Amino acid sequence: EEQLVQSGAEVKKPGESLKISCKGSGYSFTNYWIGWVRQMPGKGLEWMGIIYPGDSETRYSPSCQGQVTISVDKSINTAYLQWSSLKASDTAIYYCARVKPPTPEDGFDIWGQGTMVSVSS
Amino acid sequence: DIQMTQSPSSLSASVGDRVTFTCRASQNILRLLAWYQQKPGKAPRLLIYKASTLESGVPSRFSGSGSGTEFTLTISSLQPDDFATYYCQQYYGYSGTFGQGTKVEIK
């Protein structure tokens, strides 16, 4: 079964760092772009960026550029989203999702279960 | 940055109704548009990609149309399982933007 499994919920304080993960299985992980999507409490979906595990090419949304880092370890079929200094406004559910092949210009066909990140003092 | 505007933001409908949502892009995105369904507490589900291609396993009552800047999602006969929030997403130029969503509620 093709799936993405994300790491568990996190509770952090402002200023702390965080790295959440998304592990792919059941398909050739290095051949499909992976994206991250944010959903703040009670709000809509926000496209954050995508990465190609084969060569780590990454694209960010303008609003996320410089705020987060998207990376990948293809040896363990895992993509990451990380923050160096969290803010309360980073509180949200974060989804990883696979882009339909063969290019990054397509919809997300497989989604992770989501990781809830709560940031509060 | 390409902006996506969905209308209406919500609608009330009955089982069996035909419902149509609209999504407008701030610039020409060709047919590079997807539609998703999201239920509370769940990840989104891809329904339509490339504006009108039905994702595998999605019921045929869902259909998409449009190109350029104006797109529609139609549910031909609303079923109880269809009450959810629907999002459009453009993916032109190695970037992406979602619309703000349309919530479909039971009348």
Image: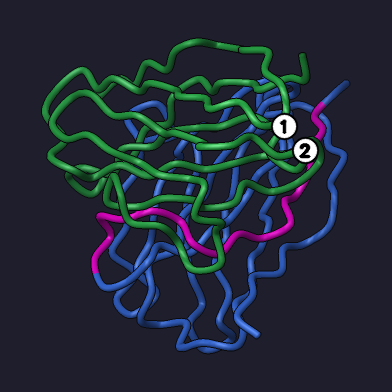
Chain colours: A blue, B green
Horizontal and vertical percent position of residue B52: 30, 48
Residue count near mark 1 (Cα–Cα under 10 Å), binned few <14, some 14–19, many ≥20:
some
Q: Quadrant of the C terminus of chain A?
A: top right
Residue assigned mark 1: B83
Q: Nearer the viewer, residue B81 or A27?
A: B81
Q: Quadrant of residue B53?
A: bottom left
Q: Is residue B81 left or right of residue B53?
A: right
Measured as percent of width and height from the top left, residue A69 is found at 48, 49
Q: In what element is the residue under mark 1?
A: loop
| x and y, in percent, of residue A24 in the image | 60, 77
Name the amino acid type tagged 1.
Answer: Phe
In the drawing, what numbered circle is on residue B80? 2
Q: Residue at x 62, y 12 (%)?
A: B11
Name the residue at 80% across, 29% down.
A119
The chain ID associated with circle 1 is: B
State which region is magenta. Answer: A103-119
As measured in the structure, the alpha-carbon distance from the residue carrying label 1 to the one carrying label 2 is 6 Å
Toward the viewer: B88 or A91?
B88
Q: Is residue A88 above or below residue A69?
A: above
- Chain letter belonging to callout 2: B
Query: What amino acid does circle 2 point to?
Result: Pro
Label 2 near label 1: C-beta < 8 Å? yes
